[in-house]
Amino acid sequence: MTLAVIGCGNLGTAVLAGLMASQQNPQNQLSGTGQCGLRPIIRSVACVQSPARGQQIAEQFGENVGGSACPVEIAVADNAEGVRRADVIILACPPNQVNEVLAAPGMREALAGKLLISMLGGVSVAAMESAMYANSEREVPGLEPCHILRAISNIAAARKKSLTIIGERSASMPNATLNLGKDVLGQIGDIIEVRTDQMPAATALCASGTAFFALFLEAAIDGAVALGIDRSEAVHMAAHTMAGAAELTLFGDDPAEIRAKVTTPGGSTARGLGVMEEGGVKEAIVRALQATASVHKS
Ligand SMILES: NC(=O)c1ccc[n+]([C@@H]2O[C@H](COP(=O)([O-])OP(=O)(O)OC[C@H]3O[C@@H](n4cnc5c(N)ncnc54)[C@H](OP(=O)(O)O)[C@@H]3O)[C@@H](O)[C@H]2O)c1
């Protein structure tokens, strides 16, 4: 299978890095949750806007970099050409570029019958179809429709630790195409299906959430450094402790119970949690999610 990525920025390169790393260890591909079996990516195409960016991507992902079994080709300033070479396309450009990308000459033909996985926050399938069919009839004899799947990964995809939300899709999408999308996305972490109306909240939690949890880490690291711990050790301690709390939660412990298990009434943890309560940390996190989700509601 050949994969193209349109929009090789923070998210696009993280997804590419994770997918390429998966190809190095075929065992990892077994995490794919679709039902169509293993689909190795034998080639990728990075669609970039300028030769300079192409050079950077080639240096990061070029053939033999990190022993990759999946060479990355570069398509410069011609997204449709990159798409023509691919079977599956990941769209990770800024949302405001959707019309420019999908209405480009030759794009509709290049995408015909293929799976387009859109990671654009807040852009509906209808909006993408309108962009794609803006300059022509919706149904062209002999031209298969493009199958659009909305999915939102996060930048932990680079370490195959994304949580990818799978949401809205084209009405006509065959099951085999949906499973193909799940197979691809399952290679960069876990996947979870949500209803279309849940996409804004899930995007806030799983995509922007990476930044929110990182802010907590930043503060914890700064606090530890102020107390005399070396920064590199503080980074390790904070990240590992957060991963530990996350692991316990993933294996079934309720976060409130975890908190209770660590907190002796009147003890040192209770004193710290009291400070957080005074600062309105919990409420602020809830409001941050609401504010973020509201941007994605259309
Ligand atoms: N970052 C995240 O954690 C995250 C998580 C979930 C979803 N998303 C979604 O992913 C998308 C990208 O986010 P990002 O944070 O990765 O942004 P970003 O770092 O700014 O990357 C966007 C990339 O798109 C490229 N681009 C812009 N216009 C293009 C065009 N017409 N054709 C081809 N490529 C084009 C840019 O190229 P240049 O560098 O040449 O300008 C840039 O490399 C957004 O829609 C966002 O909603 C992001």
Image (spheres, helix red, strand yellow):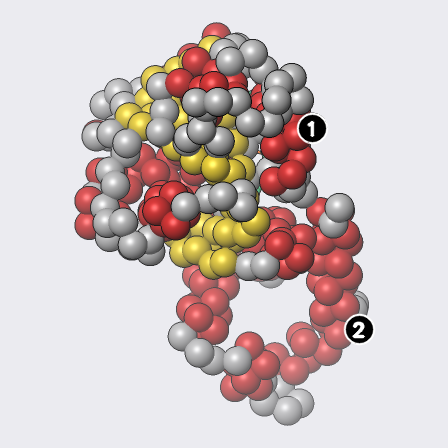
- Up the image or down, 40 lies above or below 33; here it is above
Q: Residues within 10 Å of mark 1 (few under 14, many from 20)?
A: few
Mark 1 / mark 2, whichever is N-terminal: 1
Residue at 52% across, 18% down: 107
Between disc 1 and disc 2, the foreground one is 1
Tell me the kind of residue under disc 1.
Asn
- Up the image or down, 192 lies above or below 27; here it is below
Residue at 73% across, 78% down: 274
Q: Which residue is mark 2?
A: 278
Instruction: Give residue 82's position: percent from left, percent from top.
Output: 42, 18
Which numbered marker is on residue 28? none
Seen from this angle, which residue lies furthest bottom?
265
Q: Residues within 10 Å of mark 2 (few under 14, many from 20)?
A: few
Instruction: Give residue 68's position: percent from left, percent from top.
Output: 24, 30
Ligand 1: which quarter? top right
Image quarter in which the N terminus is found:
top left
Q: Which residue is mark 1?
A: 96
Tell whether 80 sits left or right of 183: right
Tell me the kind of residue under disc 2.
Glu
Q: Are marks 1 and 2 in contact (CB under 8 Å)?
A: no
Mark 1 → mark 2, Cα distance in angstroms: 40 Å
Nearer to the camera, 239 or 19: 19
Instruction: Give residue 143's position: percent from left, percent from top.
Output: 45, 23
Residue at 64% across, 59% down: 198
